[in-house]
């Protein structure tokens, strides 16, 4: 159930039952000429909402803006610093924990959010608020590799396939040809010399912003990856709900 549609009494009842809360975290950043700036937030929000509705979890409002410094050269991109996102996630976790909601899943839709959200989860754990980061693309890595074997780091076939399911009208299919011709359509993320990364921003690999080829998108594949990610998220939430608190606490070393 959506937190913002509940009364405080209803939230107190859910807290007393030991509910699991889902917080989608996305980004507002360029996604090439085909996909909208809010792609990451849309995918994360879709997954969190679907899992919450399926299993009656507590759905928090999506954190739309994340850490997107690597896309700053493209207009429309908004970004928090890693410290800002970490502190925001910790503050929200503390707010929930103070009312007895102490099991939280950060449903993450963007790679640069991983480190600050992980730091936030570790900090909250020390305060007996048990937060975990669900990176949807990592949860279904084998399926993604099988369905999308070509390089696809950002705004390519994977995200375009998902968005063809979530919000097909937001996908600029008439720009697919342009995106396919961009140098970034066949690039992995980053440039390396002797194993050392020497280029970091999307603008260094792509003129239009896509680092992957969205023209290879397929709605059927999009349905498959979203379904699998929702299943994985649902299973993780069930695991988290079933854990005794002693199993979630940091272990102390006996002298």
Image (spheres, helix red, strand yellow):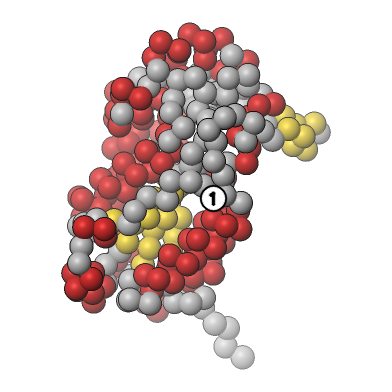
Helix, strand or loop for disc 1: helix
Looking at the image, the residue that sits furthest to the right is 194
Identify whether 132 is placed above or below 36: below
Badge 1, how many Cα within 10 Å: few under 14, some, many 20+? Answer: many
Looking at the image, is 212 positioned above or below residue 105?
A: above
- Residue 82: x %, y % from top left: 60, 53
Query: What is the quadrant of residue 70 in the picture?
Result: top right
State left or right for residue 56 relative to residue 116: left
Residue that numbered label 1 is attached to = 114
For the C terminus, the quadrant is: bottom right
Q: Is residue 100 above or below residue 237?
A: below
Residue 179 visible, this orientation: yes
Give the x, y percent position of residue 77. 55, 36
Image position of 242 with respect to 215: above or below? below
Horizontal relation, residue 45 to residue 31: left or right = left
Left or right placement of residue 220 versus residue 56 in this view: right
User: Relative to the observer, which residue lies in front, 145 or 79?
Assistant: 79
Query: In terms of image quadrants, where is residue 73?
Result: top right
Where's the N terminus, which quadrant? bottom left
Residue in the image at 58% along x and 83% along y: 253
For this rendering, which residue is in front, 52 or 175?
175
Q: Quadrant of residue 208?
A: top right
Give the left or right position of residue 224, taking residue 131 as reference: left
Q: Position of residue 22 (x, y in %)?
A: 34, 56
Residue at 57% in and 88% down? 254
Q: Is residue 195 visible?
A: no
Name which residue lies at 41% across and 41% down.
41
Image coordinates of residue 91 in percent, x first then y, are 47, 67
State the residue at coordinates (54%, 50%).
Answer: 114
């Amino acid at each position: 159930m959506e937190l913002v549609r509940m009364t405080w009494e209803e939230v107190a009842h859910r807290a007393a039952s030991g509910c699991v809360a889902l917080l989608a975290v996305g980004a507002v950043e360029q996604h090439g000429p085909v996909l909208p700036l809010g792609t990451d937030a849309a995918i994360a929000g879709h997954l969190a909402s679907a899992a919450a509705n399926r299993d009656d979890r507590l759905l928090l409002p999506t954190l739309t803006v994340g850490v997107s410094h690597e896309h700053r050269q493209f207009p429309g991109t908004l970004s928090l610093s890693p410290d800002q996102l970490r502190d925001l996630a910790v503050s929200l976790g503390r707010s929930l924990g103070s009312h007895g909601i102490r099991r939280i899943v950060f449903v993450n839709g963007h790679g640069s959010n991983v480190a600050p959200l992980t730091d936030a989860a570790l900090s909250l754990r020390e305060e007996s608020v048990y937060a975990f980061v669900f990176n949807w693309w990592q949860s279904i890595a084998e399926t993604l590799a099988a369905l999308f074997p070509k390089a696809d780091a950002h705004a390519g076939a994977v995200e375009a396939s998902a968005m063809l399911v979530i919000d097909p009208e937001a996908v600029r299919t008439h720009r697919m040809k342009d995106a396919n011709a961009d140098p970034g359509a066949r690039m992995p993320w980053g440039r390396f010399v002797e194993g050392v990364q020497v280029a970091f921003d999307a603008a260094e690999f792509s003129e239009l912003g896509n680092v992957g080829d969205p023209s290879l998108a397929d709605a059927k594949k999009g349905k498959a990856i979203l379904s699998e990610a929702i299943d994985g998220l649902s299973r993780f939430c069930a695991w988290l709900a079933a854990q005794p608190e002693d199993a979630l606490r940091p272990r102390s070393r006996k002298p």
